[in-house]
Image (cartoon, rainbow, N blue to C red):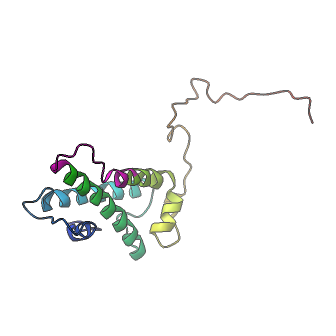
Amino acid sequence: MGAYATVALVQARNPYRAIGASTEPSTADVEEWIDQAEAEIDGRIAAAGLTSPVVNTNGIKIVRKKVVGYVAGFVEMAYAAAGGDGGNDDGQDAQELWDECMEDITDNPLKWGGILEGGTAPESSIQMRSHTTNNKDGLTVAAGDFAPTYHKDDVF
């Protein structure tokens, strides 16, 4: 069972559909999705230099909300697939919000440290992040992408 979320919390997001041992998705499916989501968010939090797993009471509630929303999106997608509705994109928004959140935790550890750890982030989250380690656009020093340029201007 998950540290932040439960099948019952995911079920509460869609109270008109049961999640059980013989349903699609099954209880085992949802428990696995919860475990995967919690592993990912804990990994991101640790990679950002923050305390993982989250121990602050409000931080746990925030992570719970993220995990439950993400897994509820999986459940909605599974319902659509089980119903044979290939054009139904229920749950896709939850997946996209999750992906954005995971990137934001990695990109803004100081902010997330304050959010998840009661207003202050540990010193380990305050670190120099260079362009080469967070390079998303393929620029390199070797290719001359960062060569200084000088301009002579007559306007003072």
Using the image as rendered, state which of residue 103 and residue 97 is in the foreground: 97
- How many numbered marks have been drawn onto this rendered protein structure? 0
Drawn side of residue 112 relative to residue 37, left or right? right
* Residue appearing at x 51%, y 37% in the figure: 135
User: x%, y% of residue 39?
Assistant: 29, 56
Q: In the rendering, at what x and y percent does residue 110 appear?
A: 53, 60
Judge whether 50 appears above or below 55 on screen: above
The location of residue 49, given as percent across then percent down, is 45, 57
In this picture, residue 3 sits left or right of residue 135: left
The picture quadrant where one finds residue 15 is bottom left
Please say if 123 is above or below 137. Answer: below
Tell me the residue at 50%/40% (across/down): 133
Q: Is residue 83 magenta?
A: yes
Q: Is residue 85 magenta?
A: yes
- 71 relative to 26 in the view: left or right: right
Q: What's the residue at 25%, 66% (across, down)?
A: 14
Viewer-closest of 104 and 125:
104
Quick one: 73 or 143, which is closer to the camera? 73
Q: Image point 34% across, 65% down: which residue?
A: 53
Which of 4 and 69 lies nearest the eye of the viewer?
69
Corner quadrant of residue 59: bottom left
Span colored in magenta: 81-96
Return the residue found at the far left. 22
Q: Residue furthest top?
A: 143
Quadrant where the image shows the C terminus: top right
Residue 136, image x, y percentages: 49, 37
Quarter of the rendering occupied by the N terminus: bottom left
